[in-house]
Image (cartoon, grey):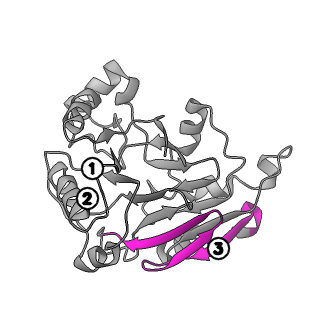
Amino acid sequence: MKITFLGTAAAEGIPFPFCNCTTCKHARTHKGRNIRKRQTLLINDDLLIDIGPDLFSSCAHLGISLAGLRYLLVTHSHGDHFHALNLELRAKMFRLETELPELTMATGPSVWTTWGTGDKPAELRRMPLLAGQQAELSPYSVRAIEASHMPSIGDAMNFIIDDGRTKLLFASDTGKYKEQVWEQLAGTRFDAVIMEATLGNRQQGRGHLSFDDFQFMLEQMSLIGAVTPRTRIFATHFSHQCVDPHEEIEAYFQQAGVVCAYDGLIIEL
């Protein structure tokens, strides 16, 4: 399983244009891995998790084509994770020389309401999905689990993705899992965990994870056998107001054996 981090920031990106905090000023000056677009994750070349407003610029910057994309998983309807225009521009009039495979989008009701009725021109097939359900997207088996994120949305999800050889937990836009989720994860062992650390060491909240919450989640996963010393762990989805420059948070996570993801990071599992 090949994973490409197309974006690793929270909703504002880093640097945020309307901010002069230390992290944003550092990013403008030093650039490199300090520049973070809104979060999107590409698995192999055919499965995308979330489709936010920075997708096109991320692909252009990294030299990535999505012409082979077949599946899209969307965690929830917030605009930094679901930007409908990206799908509208799949219409044939915008790509006269290119044929695309049908795109199966698996997500919950709040996203479908946001999307509307443009399935046909986007060559999109709907796969309604709720937490606790499973989607078969050959060669992937996807299990949706409940995320603890913004009760007003009601259907925010994380995903367990299994290609028959590798089992990945994608855990973003969530606070600490509810007890029933831990019960559902019992008996599942992950080869890799990609988990948000939005709130860094400066804030606490219920809809996202701080660095302390990140560690708590890993400890709970270890207790139920979901992660082992061989599990590869990655931190992502950072907010400019809550984290230090990349080099500093990278050093922090290295001490715990965690990889601090950055835009353009490619890993093979």
Which residue is disc 3 drawn over? 126
Q: Give the range drawn in magenta.
A: 120-147
Height in image: 50 above or below 184?
Answer: above
Distance between mark 2 and mark 1 Cα atoms: 6 Å
| In-front residue for pair 188/178 | 188
Residue flagged by tag 1: what amino acid is it? Thr
Q: Do the residues labelled 2 and 1 touch (CB within 8 Å)?
A: yes
Residue flagged by tag 3: what amino acid is it? Arg
Determine if residue 266 is in view.
Answer: yes
In primary-sequence order, the first of circles 1 and 3 is: 3
Is residue 44 highlighted in magenta?
no
| In-front residue for pair 218/244 | 218
Residue at 85 percent across and 46 percent down: it is 96
Is residue 140 highlighted in magenta?
yes
Local SS, label 1: loop
Q: For residue 105, which numbered disc appears in the image?
A: none
- Residue 150 at x, y percent in the picture: 30, 69
Residue at 37 percent across and 23 percent down: it is 31
| In-front residue for pair 79/175 | 175
In primary-sequence order, the first of circles 2 and 1 is: 1
Which residue is disc 2 drawn over? 208
**Mark 1 nearby-residue class (10 Å; few <14, some 14–19, many ≥20):** many
Determine if residue 75 is in view.
Answer: no
Height in image: 63 above or below 175?
Answer: above
In the image, taking residue 196 as reference, residue 3 lies left or right, namely right
In the image, taking residue 83 as reference, residue 32 lies left or right, namely left
Residue flagged by tag 2: what amino acid is it? His
Report the residue that reaches farthest toward the right: 97
Q: For residue 198, which numbered disc appears in the image?
A: 1
